[in-house]
Image: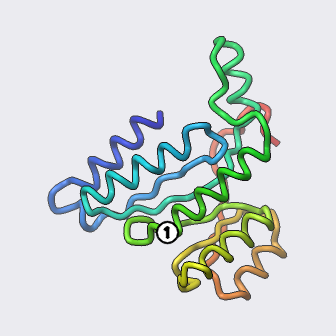
Amino acid sequence: LLDLTMDVAKRLLLEPGLGDRVRVGIVIQAYLRDAETMVEELLAWLRHHDRRVSVRLVRGAYWDSEVSQAAQRGWQAPVYPEKWQTDQTFERLTRQLLSAGEWIRPEIASHNLRSIASAMAVGESLGLAKEALEFQFLYGMGDAIQAAVSRMGYPVRIYTPLGELVPGMA
C-alpha cells in the first residue's frame, strides 16, 4: 500500500486551498531495502512542490511477517536480512531527514539508545535546535529513556498502538 499512501499524501498536499495548511505525516521503515530510495524520491517531490511533511522514522516492526509472506510467494524479502543493515540505514536516514529541515519535520521513533544518541549528535552537528526533531516511543516501553530524553529538552511523543494484533508480533 506504500504507493497508494504516497499518492494520497501528495494529492492532499497539492489540493488547492488545502495543501498549504494540511499537516501530513509519513512513516518510513528503515528495514525496507528501498527505504533510502523512498526518502530521496519524497525529498525531490517536496522540493519541487515546495511542500513540507512529517516523517516518522522507524526500524520496522513486521520483519518476521514480511520475510514469511515473501517466502510463501517466492519473492525476495523486501527487508534487510540482518539487523546491522537496518541499523546502518536508520542512521543514514536520520542524517538525511535532519538535514532536510526545510521540507521534513523529523520524528525519530526508536527505543535504541545508539540511534537516539546518534540523532542527537547529528542534530547538534547540524546546529539544529532541540525542538527541530521529535523523539517518539511506545507507551510502556523504555520509560526511563523517555524521561531522560525529555529532561534533555527534546520533544517527546508517546504512542499507544491500537488495532488488531498482528500474528507473530509480541
Could you tell me the amino acid type at mark 1? Ser
- Camera-side residue of 26 and 143: 26
Give left or right: position of 54 versus 78. Answer: left
Q: In this view, does 134 lie above or below 2?
A: below
Image spot of residue 54 (x, y percent)? 46, 63
Q: Which colour scheme is used?
A: rainbow
Q: Position of residue 115 (x, y in %)?
A: 73, 64
- Mark 1 lies on residue: 99
Circle 1 SS class: loop
Residue occupying image coordinates x 79% and y 44%:
83
Q: Residue drawn 33% across and 57% down?
A: 46
The percent position of residue 98, horizontal first and vertical second, equals 53, 69
Image point (27%, 68%), residue name: 21
Q: Is residue 20 left or right of residue 29?
A: left
**Which class describes the residues within 10 Å of circle 1: few (<14), some (14-19), or many (20+)?**
some
| Residue 63 placement (x, y as % from top left) | 73, 36
- Compared with 122, 111 (above or below) is above
x 66%, y 39%: residue? 164
Question: Who is closer to the viewer here, 94 or 23?
Answer: 94
Q: Residue furthest left?
A: 16
Pick the quarter of the image with the C terminus: top right
